[in-house]
């Protein structure tokens, strides 16, 4: 983000769940450790969207990792943004990659990756991964820690 961040819309305020991801406003605040290379991780183990074919709910465990530059995403606005997908129809690939790209485009971190670990429907789990490029040299990037789906094992 090249301009000065606006005051957060949601932080400290009563907020309602946006009706769609497009309506959701993500807040960004100044990075208190700008100039330091570090990793931020958000895990959303109960993410929900809707299947565009059946309209039935799809569930995923999302893991978002990023190395901030000038700003960080405010967690309440991220929670509301992710919650806005509850009534949004989208294929797993589009939803996962779209979340990653929107965060990357708006926040402009050094690096960002997202892992979407989708629970099976129709017997097939789908895992979707996207990253903005190679991780910066010297950045500690731990495994996302989500096991692949095992079924009955």
Image (spheres, rainbow, N blue to C red):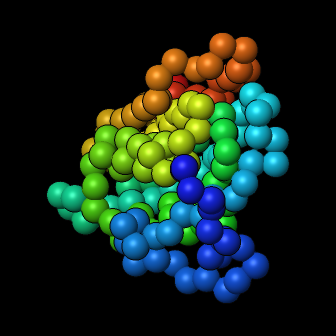
Residue 65: in sight, yes or no? no
Quarter of the image for residue 5 reads bottom right
Residue 64: in sight, yes or no? yes
The one of 57 and 102 positioned closer to us in this rendering = 102
Q: In the image, what residue occupies the spot 46% across and 77% down?
A: 18
Quarter of the image for residue 138 reads top right
Q: Is residue 42 left or right of residue 111?
A: right
In this view, 103 is above or below 115: below
Q: Is residue 33 left or right of residue 131?
A: right
In this view, 30 is above or below 141: below
Q: In the image, what residue occupies the spot 71% across and 40% down?
A: 40
Q: In the image, what residue occupies the spot 62% across and 76% down?
A: 9
Residue furthest to the front in view is 3
Residue 99, image x, y percentages: 44, 49
Residue furthest to the top in view is 137
The one of 79 and 147 positioned closer to us in this rendering = 79
Q: Is residue 110 left or right of residue 49?
A: right
The one of 146 and 111 positioned closer to us in this rendering = 111
């Amino acid at each position: 983000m090249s301009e000065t961040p606006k005051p957060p819309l949601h932080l400290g305020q009563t907020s309602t769940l946006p009706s769609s991801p497009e309506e959701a406003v993500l807040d960004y605040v100044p990075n208190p450790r700008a100039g330091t290379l570090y990793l931020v991780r958000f895990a959303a183990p109960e993410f929900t969207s809707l299947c565009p074919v059946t309209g039935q709910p799809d569930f995923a465990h999302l893991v978002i990792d990023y190395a901030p530059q000038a700003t960080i995403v405010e967690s309440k606005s991220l929670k509301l943004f992710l919650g806005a997908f509850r009534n949004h129809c989208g294929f797993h690939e589009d939803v996962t990659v779209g979340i990653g790209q929107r965060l990357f485009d708006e926040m402009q971190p050094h690096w960002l990756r997202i892992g979407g670990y989708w629970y099976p429907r129709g017997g097939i789990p789908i895992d979707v991964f996207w990253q903005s490029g190679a991780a910066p040299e010297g950045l500690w990037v731990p495994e996302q820690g989500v096991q692949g789906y095992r079924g009955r094992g």
